[in-house]
Image (cartoon, grey):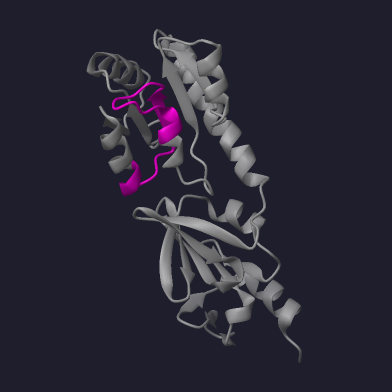
C-alpha cells in the first residue's frame, strides 16, 4: 500500500523538505512528489491529484496552506496534513477553516508521521463510502473543475487506478474504486461486470447470446453472474 500511495510534500524551506522526505522514505513511502514553492505545488496539483498532501503552513510569497486548499478538488477531497514549526491560537483557528486531517510539528517522529498518514487514509475511505453523490459531480480537468450531471453519465469503467466516466461522449478520470462509486449512484446505475457500471437509461439493446450491452456510444460486456439480475429486473417476456 505504501509504495502505491501518492504523497505531495510541500515546503518552501529546502532543508526541512529534505528532512521530511527522508523520514517518508525511511517509512517506505516511495511515491513522493516534491514542491519547494507555492507555484511548484499548484503546478503539481494541476497535473494530477495526489492521495495525500503534506504541507508546511507558511509558504513563499505570503501564501499559506489555505491557498493550497483552494486548489484541491473538493468533490474528491484529498487529505491535507499541516506541518509547521510554529503554532499559536491564530494559526490553529485559521487551520480549522480547511478541516485538515491533522497538524504536526516539524520535529514529528517517524512513528507519529506514519500513524497520521495511515489514519488519514482510513478516515477518508470511510467518508467517501458514506457520502452519496447528488445531482452532479465535479471532476478536475486541467485547471478547471468540470460539472457532470449524474444522469448524463452513460457508463463507468475501471481504468488502472482510476475510473473512466463517459458523459456526453467525453471521458473523465476520477480516483475511486468501482464498488465505492457504485454505492453512491442512483438506482438507474447497475454494475454489470467487475469493471463496468452502466446507466440503464442509455441501454439500446442486450445481446443475451454474447453477453453484450449496447449503450449510446459503446458495446459493453456483462458478466454471467449479472445476467440473471439484469434480465429479471428489466425483461418482459
- Residue 113 on the magenta span: no
Picture coordinates of residue 48, whole percent (x, y): 35, 47
Residue at x 43% of width, y 18% of height: 83
- What x and y, as percent, mark residue 204? 57, 87
Rendering coords of residue 142 (x, y %): 34, 55
Among the 4 quarters of the image, the one containing residue 61: top left
Q: Quadrant of residue 36?
A: top left
Q: Taking 33 as reference, is 21 above or below it?
A: above
117 to 133, vertically: above or below:
above
Instruction: Work out whether residue 1 can be spotted.
Output: no
Q: Residue at x 45, y 36 (%)?
A: 69
Q: How many marks?
A: 0
Res 84 → quadrant: top left
Depth check, front residue: 50 or 36: 36
Task: Specify the farthest residue to the bottom.
Answer: 237
Residue 177 seen in the current view: yes
Residue 123 is left or right of residue 10, and the answer is right
**Placement of 90 over or under 7, stated as above or below:** above
Residue 226 location in percent, x, y?
64, 70
- Residue in the foreground of this view, choosing between 184 and 66: 66
Q: Which residues are magenta?
A: 45-67
Question: Residue at coordinates 39% horizontally, 40% vertically from top-left?
Answer: 50
Give the position of the C terminus as an image quadrant: bottom right
Quarter of the image with the N terminus is top left
Does 175 sit left or right of 202 as displayed? left
Amino acid at each position: 500500500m505504501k509504495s502505491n500511495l501518492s504523497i505531495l510534500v510541500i515546503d518552501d524551506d529546502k532543508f526541512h523538505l529534505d528532512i521530511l522526505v527522508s523520514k517518508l522514505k525511511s517509512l517506505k513511502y516511495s511515491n513522493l512528489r516534491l514542491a519547494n514553492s507555492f507555484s511548484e505545488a499548484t503546478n503539481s496539483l494541476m497535473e494530477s491529484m495526489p492521495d495525500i498532501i503534506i504541507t508546511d503552513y507558511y509558504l513563499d510569497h505570503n501564501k499559506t496552506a489555505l491557498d493550497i486548499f483552494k486548489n484541491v478538488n473538493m468533490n474528491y477531497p484529498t487529505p491535507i496534513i499541516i506541518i509547521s514549526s510554529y503554532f499559536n491560537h491564530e494559526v490553529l483557528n485559521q487551520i480549522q477553516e480547511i478541516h485538515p486531517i491533522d497538524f504536526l510539528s516539524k520535529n514529528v517522529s517517524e512513528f507519529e508521521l506514519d500513524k497520521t498518514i495511515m489514519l488519514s487514509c482510513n478516515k477518508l475511505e470511510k467518508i467517501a463510502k458514506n457520502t452519496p453523490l447528488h445531482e452532479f459531480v465535479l471532476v478536475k480537468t486541467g485547471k478547471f473543475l468540470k460539472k457532470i450531471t449524474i444522469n448524463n453519465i452513460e457508463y463507468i469503467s475501471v481504468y488502472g487506478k482510476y475510473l473512466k466516466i463517459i458523459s456526453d461522449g467525453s471521458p473523465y478520470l476520477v480516483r475511486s474504486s468501482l464498488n465505492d462509486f457504485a454505492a453512491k449512484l442512483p438506482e438507474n446505475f447497475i454494475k454489470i461486470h467487475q469493471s463496468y457500471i452502466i446507466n440503464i437509461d442509455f441501454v439500446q439493446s442486450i445481446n443475451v447470446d454474447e453477453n453484450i450491452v449496447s449503450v449510446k456510444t459503446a458495446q459493453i460486456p456483462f458478466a454471467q453472474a449479472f445476467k440473471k439480475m439484469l434480465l429479471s429486473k428489466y425483461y418482459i417476456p
